[in-house]
Amino acid sequence: MIKREDVYRIGQLERPHGVRGEITFRFVDDVFDRVETDHLLIELDGILVPFFIEEYRFKSNEVALLKFEDIDTQMQAREISGCDVFFQRARSGDDVDHLSWSEIVGYKILDAQTYKPVGVVKGVDDSTINVLFEVAANDGREILIPADASLITKVDNNTRVIAMNIPQGLLDL
């Protein structure tokens, strides 16, 4: 069984496209195109189920049309509409330079100066030019930390830890 901590969300299936089983996929991470894979994980009734990709094509920078094996009608595609799509962390590779924002949700933040754990990344706010990590701090607070590359000293994909030089006083706000 695939564990939730071994995957990360890459998007959501929307409505069927046409009558041959294609479905619209709104993605936040195009890892399925960057990494060799034959399947994606779809959450059905709380269970992650592999669906094998027959083909796909991009409609825009955020939308692809997917055709899964054994999904051959509009009605079958409609049954999986609205489902979240996940990708296995182990299949996304170890290339730290190409980590997506979606992939680092769940990573622990470590203060590189004191070696103390700060908290866990719960989300990434990239709605403005200054991207922020939304962190559930170990003391129960929700804090925002700039996701600036100059502050990140190390990323360990195996332990899922990001070491950062956190500006002095930021954690006291």
Image (spheres, helix red, strand yellow):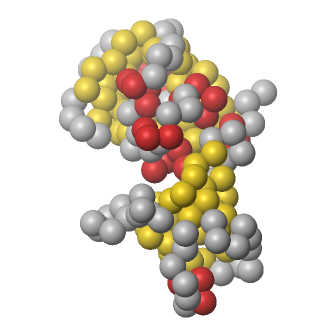
Residue 173 seen from this side: yes
Image quarter hosting the C terminus: bottom right
| Residue shown at 60% from the left, 77% from the top | 142
**Image vertical order of residue 108 relative to residue 130, above or below:** above
From the viewer's side, name the closer residue of 79 and 59.
59
Q: Which residue lies furthest to the front in this view?
A: 113
| Residue shown at 50% from the left, 29% from the top | 79
From the viewer's side, name the closer residue of 130 and 151.
151
Left or right: where does residue 47 sit relative to residue 153? right
**Image vertical order of residue 58 relative to residue 38, above or below:** below
Residue 17 point in image, percent of width and height: 29, 25
| Residue shown at 55% from the left, 84% from the top | 168
| Residue shown at 63% from the left, 45% from the top | 156
Residue 155 point in image, percent of width and height: 58, 49
From the viewer's side, name the closer residue of 15 and 11.
11
Residue 154 point in image, percent of width and height: 57, 52
